[in-house]
Image (cartoon, grey):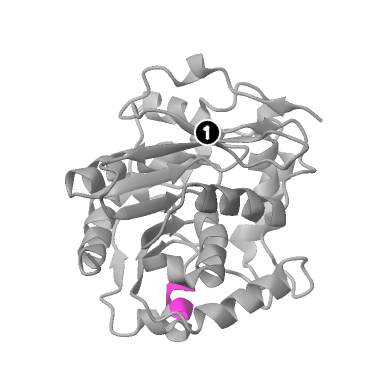
Amino acid sequence: MKILKTPLSRFKQLPGYSFQAHYIDVGDTAQTLMMHYVDYGATDAPIILMLHGQPSWSYLYRKMICEAEANGFRVLAPDLIGFGKSDKFDSQEPYTYANHLTWLERFFLGTGMNNVNLICQDWGGLLGLRLVAKYPDKFAAVVAANTMLPTGDQHPGEDFLKWQRFSQEVPDFPVGKVIQRATVNELIQEVEDAYDAPFPTEEYKCAVRKFPMLVPISPDDPESANNRQAWQSLAKFNKPFLTAFSDSDPITAGGDKIMQKLIPGCFNQPHVTLKGGGHFLQEDLGDQLIETAISLFRGNI
């Protein structure tokens, strides 16, 4: 099993993405594993942590990062292991839900963040909400967008099962085109190419293919019990928690209502359904999403 590093030449002149690269070792004592992250804004400014999902990377948040910094925030936006500029394995085997959590937790603790404002979408929520559950004192507020923390106790829906099959059967996983198909707006070719940039060949896409298979879809899934335990913690989380879902995402539709019902921090918050957005609402409605988030986060400064 090898660790792959995407050639940095693949990331030259990406539209709207010229952030300085930062890296942190999230491996164990036997292996170095470098996670890339954006760190943009004044070091003493309030922090927004932006967590992406699959098959995207921190590029997804490029416009929101700039807008947040312009409004006086410092943004940290990591690339999960296997994505973006972070290290990648040439095998699906290391990519487990538990390992992704460990790597993200090492990043989170290693960067010394506190009073964190979280924006999470897709797998950014499946991982980020587990961090909130484990370290509630380190978070000031949460915005959850098109995401959920599944326990496998409900049927995932046919659309998701089709997505699982596609991820395993398609000969060449078309990352950029997947992003395009899950947005409402038309992406220019250079942006679609930017989503493909981290993955020169199929060998680099093991994490991309594995993520759909890690979502708990049955009660006896390896992480179902851990997610149920996380829900017990989230059921006590009373800091501001806002859902900002789009209106055109069949995969996560309804997840916002569950969070609003079960998480105390959701009570009496101005939850929104953003109109005209697909699954990757950062592309379709990034300006509205960050405006909504900043409005919430400013109340905690």
Tell me if residue 154 can be seen: no
Q: Left or right? Give the position of 32 relative to 119.
A: right
Helix, strand or loop at label 1? It is loop
Q: Left or right? Give the position of 167 relative to 159.
A: right
Horizontal and vertical percent for residue 27?
68, 40
Q: Residue at x 63, y 63 (%)?
A: 158
In which quarter of the view is residue 192 placed? top left
Residue placed most toward the observer, 167 or 297? 297
Q: Is residue 168 above or below residue 226?
A: above
Residue 277 included in the magenta stretch of the image: no
- Start and end of the magenta stretch? 254-259
Residue kind at label 1, given as amino acid type? Gly
Q: Left or right? Give the position of 121 relative to 293.
A: right
Residue placed most toward the observer, 9 or 164? 9
Q: How many marks?
A: 1
Horizontal and vertical percent for residue 13?
36, 18
Horizontal and vertical percent for residue 104?
57, 50
Horizontal and vertical percent for residue 184?
36, 47
Tell me if residue 226 can be seen: yes
Q: Is residue 236 above or below residue 271?
A: below
Q: Residue at x 70, y 46 (%)?
A: 210
Q: Main secondary structure of the magenta part?
A: helix
Q: Residue at x 44, y 61 (%)?
A: 146
| Pointer 1 local density, CA inside 10 Å: few below 14, some 14–19, many at least 20 | many
Question: Quadrant of the image for the C terminus?
Answer: bottom left
Question: Quadrant of the image for the N terminus?
Answer: top right
Q: Which residue is mark 1?
A: 84
Task: Name the outermost residue toward the left.
Answer: 71
In which quarter of the view is residue 19 placed? top left
